Amino acid sequence: MKTLVLFLLTIFSISVSGQTVWVADNNFNAPTGSNVFSTIQAAVNAAAPGDIIQVQPSPTTYGNVSINKQLTLMGIGFNVDKDIPLTSIVGNITLTNTPDNTSDADGTRIIGLQFNILNLAPNTGPAFTLENILVQSCQLTSYISAVGDYSPTDGLEVRDCYFASTLSIRTYLPLDNVVIRNNLFLGRIEFRSTTAGSNIITNNILYDGIYIVAEGTATIISNNNFMGASGTETAFNTKLKDCLVSNNIFYGSTPSISTGGTTSSAFERNAFTNNLVHSTGDDTMPPTGGGVGNSGSGNIIANPDFVDMQMLNTWSSTYDFTLQGGSPAINAGTDGTDIGITGGSYPITGTNFALKTTAAPVIQILNTSTVINPGDDLPVRIKAKSN
């Protein structure tokens, strides 16, 4: 037992070399110490750039937090497979700069938290560009936002997250070098800035549409599963320009650019290649509905033959997106891998789609004897998951 503890402590000391670990813990039995705070904002205020803040699972929210330095916020994640499955709950998270612009939240990582809104780059002082942000293994009850008097974001990765609201991402400010992958979206993704950026939306499950205004973006939309009840959901909301749309499955969610029976002229110069379309109400590819310059090749109208899937506009964790043998989507993508989420650069594999709880290890079971005699060993049963 002593050897195990020493080994774990050695690994921990190496992993945080040069960084200070702070703890936010608002539980009634929270430990005390100079590095422990009952609010997440107090821990952020005490931390130096590069530090780590561990947000302990709790039945109570930690409230809102504003960050103007490079930090890592790490919680236990969601869909927690452990005894007493509490999560690390935060209100709104704001990534900003100091009033004199000598520091900002560049390089901040948000991992394993459940929170409401992520505000990207509101100005508290001179305008700046927010850079290199990671959001991983989080559950958002609302959305990612960049509206109003905000600054551009250059470098954003959102992966392994669950967006539970009807609106998932909305930005009126330029987003560049964005990678959105391996997420579940119940709401829309809206890039409303007219300024071009180089962005990738790949290997996601989407139950609502994508809306892209900027011209010349060459945004890549690949290997996603667009889901919905037959003919009642629209994969692209009103506008889509200069996008490369390849290797996606449209399953009940129509790729046509019509809303309420009307069509849009703001659907232009998009290239559709090797997509699979099934029972969407309008299986035409490239999609119909106004606009000019759209093209298509290698697209398939066929049933993808999922192992277990309902053509509904509601999500269930029991769904199984595995492609049955003989599926026309197998190895039919432009890169020789599957069409849909099981192919491409970030494939989702396994018998069904299960979002990772967190990038951190989780102790699922920790059992000890309730009564021991003096001098006896303490038997402990631990079950952990590496993630």
Image (spheres, grey):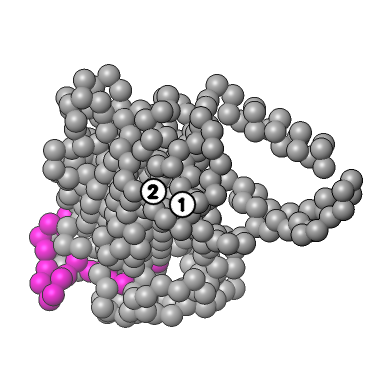
Residue 118, given in percent of the width and then of the height, sits at 30, 47
Q: Are marks 2 and 1 in contact (CB under 8 Å)?
A: yes
Magenta region, residue range:
249-269
Q: Secondary structure at mark 2?
A: loop
Tell me, yes or no, whether the highlighted magenta stretch contains residue 42. no
Q: Is residue 107 above or below residue 292?
A: above
Do we see residue 159 in this rendering?
no
Q: Which mark is residue 28?
A: none
Tell me which residue sits at (71%, 30%) in the image: 10
Q: Residue at x 81, y 38 (%)?
A: 2
Residue type for callout 1: Ser
Residue 14 in view here: yes
- Residue 69 percent coordinates (x, y): 35, 28
Taking depth in this image into account, of 220 and 228 the one nearest to the observer is 228
Residue at 27 percent across and 73 percent down: it is 233
Q: Residue at x 23, y 22 (%)?
A: 101
Q: Quadrant of residue 239?
A: bottom left
Q: Which residue is mark 2?
A: 62
Q: Name the N-terminal-most of marks 2 and 1.
A: 2
Residue 255 inside the magenta-drawn segment: yes
Left or right of 127? Residue 299 is: right
Return the residue nearer the eye: 48 or 146.
48
Report the front residue among 106 and 178: 106
- Labels 2, 1: front one: 2
Measured in 3D between alpha carbons, the distance from the residue under mark 2 to the one under mark 1, in whole angstroms, is 8 Å
**Residue 104 at what x, y percent from top left?**
30, 27
Kindly identify which residue carries mark 1. 88
**Residue 259 at x, y = what percent?**
15, 71
Label 1's element?
loop
Query: With respect to residue 126, does 376 lie above or below?
Result: below
Residue type, mark 2 in image: Tyr
Residue 142 falls in which quadrant of the image?
bottom left
